Image (tube, grey):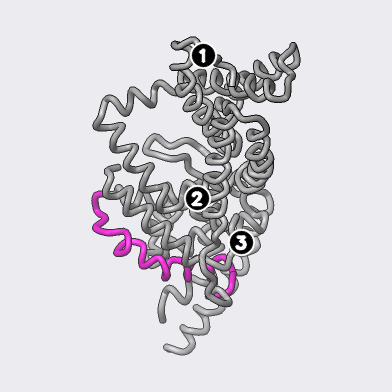
């Protein structure tokens, strides 16, 4: 199964998790997701997700000057985002456990 | 970042802007602005051969972005890019030329003439304010037009390589004062026509000069004010040309007053 298909459903959660460690700007979030092992994550998907989460009120943003060029827009979790991350993590763990059990049963 | 990557980044963002057609214009502008540092960083990365290899085709990027934003995949129908920036540029150009002609005619000898272009000028300034002065993004969209971007790039190159060009740019505060002086002269002429050359005319002329400086300074920081600053420049040029014409009369002792 294509990882990119699986990612669609959980990218929100992955982005929220990355931002809960530390605030980040678009490219930086992409880099951290890839470092964590999500190699297939697309720049556009991550940026679109950040923007949608921000529009949905789960993130705040602020601009910070960069030494290399134009100002960068940083995103940070707010209370709504933290709540969404907690709920999402719970749902994900339940779902992952169910899937693991299901697959173990199938391959046994 | 070198010039090659800069051009490549702009080309990529321009195509992306087109591919996002159908989203609200303000949204597109914000997206492109957000992405500029990101795309520049990727372009500047020594490991990047080309942006398309690294980020995918702009069409693909736009599709992925729409999907992540939860927007419909494709624009409902293809729409030509909005003509608004070009309209704004045209309005600004026509108003500036009208102001230039009005400035010239203000110093003309025949009565009544200055009044007609002035009427056009009032309409022109109103249109210029509508097209450029109201909205922060209008001037940004105009300067993003390919034709203006080319001019801007050429100027930047000239400034880097020709010390004279950089010197001329550094003169702008002085140029602004010259512009204000001609705005003053034009207003004196104008009020002369209407026979109001008393304290009222003098006050108006000084006000025009001060206003020119204020508007010029303002426009330097806030591009919206170019709606007035550029036509004022046109007016000053028209007045200046007429003043040059009148100079020989001064030398021969003929009447200088138009």
C-alpha separation, residue under disc 1 versus residue under disc 2: 63 Å
Can you give x and y, in whole percent of width and height, for residue B63 in the image? Answer: 48, 71
Disc on the earlier residue, 1 or 3? 3
What separation in Å lies between label 3 and label 2 (alpha carbons)?
15 Å
Closer-to-camera residue (B56/A53): B56
Q: Tell me whether marks 1 and 2 sit on the same chain.
A: yes
Above or below, comparing residue B227 to residue A49 in the picture: above
The answer to whether residue B35 is visible is yes
Q: Nearer the viewer, residue A25 or B35?
A: B35
The residue shown at (56%, 25%) is B217
Which chain does tag 3 point to?
B
Distance of label 1 from label 3 (alpha carbons):
62 Å
| Whether residue A96 is visible | no
User: Mark 2 or mark 1, which is nearer the start of the sequence?
Assistant: 2
Mark 1 and mark 3, same subunit?
Answer: yes
What residue sits right under mark 3 in the picture?
B24
Residue B156 is tagged as: none
Q: Element at badge 3?
A: loop
Residue B254 is tagged as 1
Residue labelled with disc 2? B34
Q: Is residue A45 located in the magenta-colored stretch of the structure?
A: no
Label 3 neighbour load within 10 Å: few <14, some 14-19, many 20+: few
Q: Residue at x 32, y 59 (%)?
A: B51
How packed mark 1 is, by other alpha carbons closer than 10 Å (few <14, some 14-19, many 20 or more), is few
Question: Looking at the figure, which quarter contains the N terminus of chain B?
Answer: top left
Which mark is in front, 1 or 2? 1
Query: Looking at the rendering, which quadrant does residue A83 occupy?
Result: bottom right
**Is B71 part of what is drawn in magenta?**
yes
Write down the region rendered in magenta: B46-74
Residue occupying the point 53% across, 50% down: B90
Q: Residue at x 54, y 71 (%)?
A: B79
């Amino acid at each position: 199964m294509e990882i990119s298909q699986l990612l669609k459903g959980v990218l929100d959660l992955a982005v929220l998790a990355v931002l809960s460690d530390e605030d980040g700007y678009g490219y930086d979030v992409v880099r951290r997701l890839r470092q964590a092992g999500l190699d297939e994550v697309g720049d556009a998907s991550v940026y679109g997700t950040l923007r949608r989460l921000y529009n949905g009120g789960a993130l705040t943003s602020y601009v910070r000057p960069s030494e290399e060029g134009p100002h960068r827009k940083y995103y940070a979790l707010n209370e709504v985002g933290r709540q969404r991350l907690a709920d999402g993590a719970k749902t994900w763990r339940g779902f992952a456990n169910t899937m693991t059990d299901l697959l173990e049963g199938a391959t046994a | 970042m070198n010039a090659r990557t800069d051009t490549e980044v702009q080309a990529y963002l321009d195509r992306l802007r087109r591919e996002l057609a159908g989203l609200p214009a303000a949204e597109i502008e914000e997206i492109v602005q957000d992405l500029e540092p990101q795309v520049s960083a990727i372009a500047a990365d020594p490991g990047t051969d080309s942006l398309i290899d690294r980020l995918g085709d702009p069409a693909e990027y736009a599709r992925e972005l729409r999907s992540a934003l939860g927007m419909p995949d494709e624009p409902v129908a293809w729409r030509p890019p909005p003509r608004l920036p070009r309209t704004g540029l045209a309005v600004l150009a026509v108003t500036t030329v009208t102001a230039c002609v009005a400035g010239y005619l203000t110093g003309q000898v025949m009565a009544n003439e200055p009044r007609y272009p002035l009427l056009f000028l009032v309409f022109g300034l109103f249109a210029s304010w509508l097209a450029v002065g109201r909205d922060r993004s209008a001037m940004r969209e105009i300067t993003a037009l390919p034709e203006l971007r080319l001019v801007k790039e050429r100027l930047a190159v000239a400034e880097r390589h020709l010390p004279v060009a950089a010197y001329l740019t550094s003169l702008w505060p002085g140029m602004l004062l010259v512009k204000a002086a001609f705005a003053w002269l034009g207003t004196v002429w104008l009020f002369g026509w209407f026979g109001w050359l008393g304290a009222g005319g003098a006050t108006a002329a000084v006000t025009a000069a001060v206003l020119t400086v204020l508007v010029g300074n303002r426009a330097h920081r806030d591009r919206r004010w170019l709606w007035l600053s550029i036509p004022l420049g046109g007016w000053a040029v028209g007045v200046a040309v007429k003043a040059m014409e009148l100079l020989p009369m001064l030398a021969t002792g003929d009447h200088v007053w138009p």
